[in-house]
Image: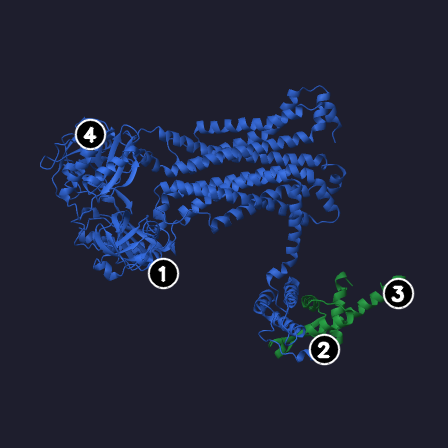
Amino acid sequence: MTKRDFLGEFEQLVLLAVARLGETSYGVTILEAIRERTGRAASIGAVYATLARLEDKGYVRSWLGSATGERGGRARRHFTLRPAGTRALDASRQAQEAMWRGLEWKSRAEGV
Amino acid sequence: MARSRMEVPGGGRLNRPVLFGLAGRLLRAFLGREAAPAILGDLTELWAARVTEGRRPSLRDHVWFWRQVAGCLAPRTALAIRDQPPPSFIRRGKTMDTLFQDLRFALRTIRRGPAFAALVAITMALGIAATTVVYSAVDGLVLRPFPFPDGNRLIGVGTAYPRLGVELGFMENMSPAEYLDTRRAPSLQHVIAWDMGNRQVTVGENTENLFSGFWWGDAFQTLKMTPYLGRGFRPDEITRAERVAVLSYRVWRTRFGADSALVGGKIRVNGEPFQVIGIMPPRTLLYGMDLWIPMPVGPEVYRRNGRVFQVMARLAPGVSIDRANAELEVIARQVEGQYGSAFPEYGGWKMQAVTWTDINVQSLKSAAMILIAAVGFVMLLVSTNVATLLLGRSAARAREIALRAAVGASRRRILRQLLTESVLLALAGAAVGVALGYLGVAALSRTLEAGTLPLAGDLAVNGRVLLVAVGVAMLAGLGFGTVPALQALRLDPQRSLQTASGGATAHQSRLRLQRILVGVEAALAITLLAGGGYLVRSFLELRAVDPGFAPSRVLTMRLSLARERYPRARVEPFFAVLRERVAAVPGVRGVATASQFPPGVFLRQQLRIDGAAPLPEGQQPVAFVTLVSPGYFEMMEIPVRRGRPLTSEDRIGAPGVVTINEPLAARYFPGQDPVGKRIRIGSGDRPPYEIVGIVGATRNRGLDRAAEPELFISTLQADGLDNQLFLLVRTEGDPRGAIAAVRAIVRSIDADQPVYMVRTVDEALANSQVNRRLSTVLLGLFGLFALVLAAVGIYGVVSYAASQRTREVGVRMALGASAGSVTGLFLRQALLPVVIGASVGLLAAFGIGRAMASLLFGVRSGDPATLLASGALLALVGLMAAYLPARRASRLDPMRALRAE
């Protein structure tokens, strides 16, 4: 695996959000999911930038969905995981777990 | 969550982020039409969730919204849609980041060495100032002298009469009948004809003498210009000679109070009531004419050879000028066939369309091209000079560069960093240079206004000039940055890190490069010096030319008697009274009137010499024919070589007599005595004139051209033929002191008679050389600038060499070398490249001289005196520039020198 194939932290968060949301995943729901679970208030721009990169890498694909009134008649752009995306998430998780294994220190327990 | 948002209806007017529309436009512009709507939809949804119904959005909400938008505009946000690359500026995102980094770093470097940066910027500024001045002049005078749309489709129709020896001319070259002939050419549209003269215009109490055009046709349509106010002439107004007038914007503003009620109002033109129908746009359009009135003069007024008009037209769309010329040629041959017997000058005559720009700026073109070339040399020299300075400095920076290379900066990255610095320096210099150039252009424009250029455009630092200046600066920055940057990259980082300044090999290669550059500088400098030198010598030669008359302390002005009030019989009496009264003014030594005077003689006619064998086609005698009052030769101090001058006895009723100048005698009466011979003027059947005297030659076509045949008729025998004459007054003291007295006398004879073109003959002579003076001053300045730059370059190289060789000098001196031998060592090393470069430059100076031939007078390309002087000057300055640092090196204390490093 080359260096490029490792996922960045925010990339992981976005990919995980897409995985969780399934068919209802689009910009707003992804943003909300990340905020709800991590408390992190990302900007919509950051989310889209990451999605663009992930789409480039072939990890997600997108299609245009329905337009609704509260969106001013603008269609949603939905995202879904591609097999390569699942594999990349797996690889990242394995790498992290391998690195965490057996590691323990105080501050982590104290939640600093 | 999503559900709760659904309940909030979005899009209410009140409940919208500020400038929502702009956000949409920005997103579309940055991200494309495909990607933007989804993001904008999300933003709308988020906004609606944040600013719930009924709540007024606060400032914080708006700030939040725009921060979100700004986040989306960051280049990487473009949601790449398959098979569609993002807009180019987004792909360049990374480059831009690096650029900012480079810029920040460059600014830091400049701040660390402000003196060096200032030196580079000043050198650059002077070069860019020169570029700005020259390019504004070329742009305003040669490339776009007229502000007309599609100006390159405007043409003038010129005529040439080989029979009369008359070359292609565009002024007062067409009769009404010939104008109607040109209108038959289908390739020409909006053909107009006009004559120019002066008219007295009265608005209310205010009377002005205005340079005026008398039109056949609507010039606005031909020029594709729209009037500032009102309209142009309608065809029926032309044909019915309606009394309507168009005024220029400048007189309307400055003299008639910019009153828009004037349009539709009445003015008086030479006392006659006219209605103002329009105001020209805020620039003078043609030849500075301030008043346009219709003047339909059909063939019934002027004969077929009554040539008073100039003709202008627009090429029909898609038609080439060659096709127009082919049509004009057909028409010319038809006219020759039909009228050739009555008007012999039609034999082989030519009508030719030439673009309006070429007609008016041809004479300036060669000077312009030479100045452009010269300024190119100056910029090359500036770049070379800065490159040598940078090389000297890169020694000091070698360590820094090596360090960066050692920690992994790529060559490209370092190169870009160095180039960013040099371009930044160049642009800083350019900013100062453009400001300087702005002042220079203002000065130039004042000089030229005094001159007599047929300008309609402006001389100004406009957008094109700025573009050229900035472009040249960028190129120069890249140019002078590349050489030292590449040299710096050739260094071995390890070596550079070990020694303070990059090791001995580095010095060697740097020094070698510097010497080459100094040689190039010397070559460029001597070329420019010689170019300026040729012109200065031409100028001196020209000043030494004997004009053939005494031009100093002569006041001249022109008077045009209106035909309405002065029929032919009253013209000469008016001027006779004027001469008599002006002669009585204290301090006036002589008075004369003349239809033209040197150096501005231009009216030519065909001659026929009684009893002479007919000459072959194309060699018929032609001469300038000038009307002069008796006493003209005495007043102008033109010597009478044989026979007698014209006297007051030669009047109507007495036999017709003329005097001729020496060139006429020499050309058409070789080996004979012309006095007593008879000569006829023009093609008509008027009786011949007897030649009574020969006068000395004057430089009647300008100081830089040989005297041409000229023939003089007395105004007393001309029967008021010419109602426009110059008054010439020679005074004891300052001729301008007589202006008031002469004006008062004119008013006392005819209170309504204006005078114009008031100036001294000296000024007229200077004006005829304005072109040449300008190029001389500019090229002379460039030459001096080049000299200074070369000196700075030589000084820099010797200083650098001395600083690098401190130790060696110490060793030499410790071993007994004298200070003189050390100085000599540095001088020899420094001056060798200068000598080689200067030799190459002298060769180039030959070529330059040849290219400048049209501007030279009395000096030939490769003029030894000029080349010698340029070489000597460069040698002297170069020696001084090298001597100062060389001597400093030789004054070192050997012990301290040995301990250096």
Asked whether residue B861 appears in the rendered view, the answer is no
Disc 2 or 4, which lies upstream in sequence?
2
Callouts 4 and 1 on one subunit: yes
Q: CA distance from mark 4 to mark 1?
A: 55 Å
- Callout 4: chain: B
Secondary structure, mark 3, is helix
> Are the residues flagged by discs 3 and 1 in contact, CB closer than 8 Å?
no
Chain with blue colouring: B
Q: Which numbered dot is residue B34?
A: none
At 37% across and 53% down in the image, what residue appears?
Answer: B282
Quadrant into which the N terminus of chain B falls = bottom right
From the image, tell me which residue sits under label 1.
Answer: B317
Is B889 or B617 nearer to us in this picture?
B889
Q: CA distance from mark 3 to mark 2?
A: 32 Å
In this picture, is B842 found above or below B813?
below
From the image, tell me which residue sits under label 4.
Answer: B694
Secondary structure, mark 2, is loop
**Figure colour of chain A:** green
Q: CA distance from mark 2 to mark 4?
A: 113 Å
Q: Amino acid at mark 2?
A: Met
Disc 1 or 2, which lies upstream in sequence?
2
Q: CA distance from mark 1 to mark 2?
A: 67 Å
Q: Residues within 10 Å of mark 1 (few under 14, many from 20)?
A: few
Q: Amino acid at mark 1?
A: Pro
Q: Which numbered dot is residue A109?
A: 3
Q: Which numbered dot is residue B1?
A: 2
Asked whether residue B536 appears in the rendered view, the answer is yes
Residue B194 percent location from the top left of the image:
26, 52
Secondary structure, mark 1, is loop
Residue B309 percent location from the top left of the image:
25, 50
